[in-house]
Amino acid sequence: MTLSTLVLALLAASVAVGLSLLMGYAGQVSLGQASFYMIGGYTAALMATNSLPTWLGLLAAPAAAAVAAALLGVPLLRLRGHQLAFATLAVQLILLNLAGQQSWTGGDIGLQAIPQLTVAGYEFSGDVPYACLALVTLIVVALVSRNIIASRPGRGLRALATSEVAASSSGVPVAAYKLAVFSLSAAFAGLAGGIYAFYIGYVSPTSFPVLLSIEYVVMVVVGGTGSIWGATAGAVAITVLLQVLNDLGAREGMPATAPTVLSYGLFGTLLMAMMLFAPRGLVPTTVALWRRRTNQAAPPTPKPAQIPTET
């Protein structure tokens, strides 16, 4: 794995952990998570190219994505299941269309020559600094998610994922919790998008295709919904596999559409395989098999000696 692939995998893992929090614990399906990744990327790029401090752009990226999610979530989160999934997909299509037609976003050409991220006089330049930054970001995202899951609101999220009616009857503020977790997952995606903009130095509508949102869903499903480790493992595995397929599709003699066709083929195959053989995801299934094998290997617990009864 090259360092550039590692940076992209760590950024994808940050988005996937947020999406796993949304799908696995709150039971909300989103097919437009890349739209918040795009909002974060464009926010950081616009501020940096307009001579504002780059560190300020990095802070504004998750904030802009969270605010956008809060505004969009009020009408969208009234929907459920596939209706919510299609609505979030529509949001991304609308944002891509708007970004491609506005002059201040650079239109279809996008924003180029984005300055390198500079924090306290230190300029992030090269793969190693961005790999460290992406790793720290993933650790922060994972810790925040873990603390939320273990808290009382986390238990409320799990309850509403099972039954919103039962959760509401138990005193869980369903609408507020759904909007909060939707905004938080968007903030994670926006933060990763901001780092991506500084790392690549260029953003355009083609940087955030609809296929990217499908990738995030596949990462979560393959790794394991409702699992921080599962989302991380799924993101790394899918990013590496896609890099291999892109290299294969770009070889001489392959058609120009080969990388896209191979990517769709990979996603379809993985999703069918997971639904058939490991519907809980790779990490939860592996953990369950390991625990079962460990329990079988352990010696049987001796039964307590029987106390003789007096006759």
Image (cartoon, grey):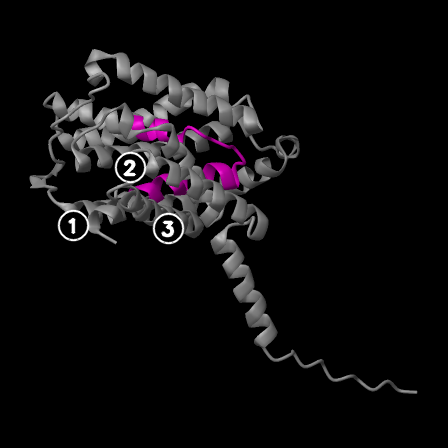
Task: Name which residue type carries label 1.
Answer: Val
- Is label 2 or label 3 in front? 3
Residue identifier under label 2:
192
Q: Residue 69 at x, y = what percent?
A: 40, 24
- CB of mark 2 within 8 Å of CB of mark 3? no
Residue 100 versus residue 165 in the image, above or below? above
Q: Quadrant of the N terminus?
A: bottom left
Q: Position of residue 115 (x, y in %)?
A: 11, 31
Label 2: which secondary element: helix
Circle 3 sits on which residue? 237
Q: Residue at x 23, y 36 (%)?
A: 196
Question: Mark 2 or mark 3: which comes first in sequence?
Answer: 2
Quarter residue 98 falls in: top left
Mark 3 is on which residue type?
Ala
State the extent of the magenta-drawn residues as a range.
11-38
Task: Give whichever of 108, 54 is nearer the camera.
Answer: 108
